[in-house]
Image: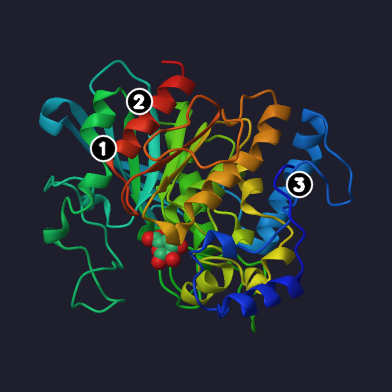
Amino acid sequence: MVFVFRFTRLSLIILLAASGLSAQEANYDESKVPPFELPDPLVMEDGTEVTDAETWGEKRRPELLALFTEHVYGESPPRPEDLPIEVTVVDDDALGGKAIRKEVTVWFLGEKTGPSMSLLMYLPQIARPVPAFLGLNFGGNHSVQPDPSITLNAGWFRNNPGKGYVDNRATEESRGSAASRWPVEMIVDRGYALCTVYYGDIDPDYDDGFENGIHPLFDEKSEGERPGDAWGSIAAWAWGLSRAMDYLEHDEDVDAEHVAVLGHSRLGKTALWAGAQDERFALVISNNSGCGGAALSRRAFGETVQRINASFPHWFCDNFTRYNGREDELPVDQHQLIALIAPRPVYIASAAEDRWADPRGEFLSGYFADPVYRLLGAKGLDRETDDMPEIDAPVDTGTIGYHIRSGRHDVTRFDWEQYLDFADRHFAR
Ligand code: GTR
């Protein structure tokens, strides 16, 4: 590896003391990034080097998945045996006639009662099956388009000003509120389906001791503390994406061999973990996923492991808190999460003003995942150097795509244009 530093706990303390940074303050100074040594994706825990695809697939990949499960995201339950579904809406005249809109309910407990999630789909009016993008949304399915006929999700909502945090409900006024992040017409015009699910259907995003959402449906009832590797909310949302994929495999309008999973921010972390575990996702997209997503933890730039665990104690497994301020002791780093997607195409997007998410750390995780792609015969990241790419100049001709766009933490039309181009290239259309 090119980019290797020796790092000790002591050196961090000295560095922080010298820089006057408290462990709580965010660092935005590149010269104050602690020296670090990344764990090599191609070296097994017992020190054996991985030099062929077979050893990667049979030994190293499972080993890395187990390490991320135990130390970062927690253990998810297997797929339920039965996953009843019901197509509740088919509108042949959506988007002024250019699309078909469907709504599908998927129940989690083997019968058509109890907890469920609702898929909202837009399909182009062309010969199908078509490839698809699948992503969770923050604001409810009705936030994706201003269409008044989209069913409002039940349950918990955040960001309804003045209504408190826990008891919010979806409102009519919030229809289309996230439309700029979901350019449905462009997606459909380019010949793709879009499938989206409200993340709160799977697990409401606040720390309630895992009483709500899908955790209690699958967790063993036991007294005392949850195990350190019990699944957090990111693992739950990722599990929900795989359940959506279970449905898509049976939808005749969708080419299930060509489904790209994507997500923004905490849902970008989620898309990466879903894509790492579930090889049915043919392409994975991380939009500004930051700490616990594409950004290298050891850089401790912007949001750190300690900060994220303090602000969002329900996102990761409890074992992840062991690495608060001790990123060097993590048995994995996030370039290995990208490597788990190999040789499938992955696209990592940053935003120049989104320093909290550490754009350079996001880029470097792609850079350091590259050797695994090459080992598996894929092109990897088409870039010789680890210098940051220019702003608004995608590096997207390999199997690992990357861009840093101008502007802030968001999903924009520019981001989607790159994802569509990248998907066109890899889905060979
Ligand atoms: C921030 C959090 C980030 C990112 C973001 C989001 O508050 O610190 O890790 O996930 O939220 O999801 O919008």
Q: Which residue is mark 3?
A: 40
Q: Would you identify the image quadrant in which residue 224 lies?
A: bottom right
Disc on res. 253: 2
Q: Residue 196, percent across and down?
A: 34, 44
* Of marks 1 and 3, the one in the foreground: 3
Q: Is residue 74 visible?
A: no
Q: Amino acid at mark 1?
A: Lys
What SS does tag 3 mark?
Answer: loop
What SS does tag 1 mark?
Answer: strand
Name the image quarter holding the C terminus: top left
Name the image quarter holding the N terminus: top right
Q: Mark 1 or mark 2: which comes first in sequence?
A: 1
Q: Would you identify the image quadrant in which residue 76 lies?
A: bottom right
Q: Which residue is mark 1?
A: 102
Task: Establish if 356 lies above or below 345.
Answer: below
As measured in the structure, the alpha-carbon distance from the residue carrying label 1 to the one carrying label 2 is 11 Å
Q: Are marks 1 and 2 in contact (CB under 8 Å)?
A: yes
Q: Amino acid at mark 3?
A: Asp
Q: Mark 3 or mark 2: which comes first in sequence?
A: 3
Pointer 3 local density, CA inside 10 Å: few below 14, some 14–19, many at least 20: many
What residue is rendered at 52% in x and 50% in y?
A: 360
What residue is rendered at 30% in x and 22% in y?
A: 191
What residue is rendered at 24% in x and 24% in y?
A: 189
Figure quarter occupied by ligand 1:
bottom left
What residue is rendered at 30% in x and 76% in y?
A: 165
Q: Amino acid at mark 2?
A: Asp
56 sits left or right of 48 in the view: left
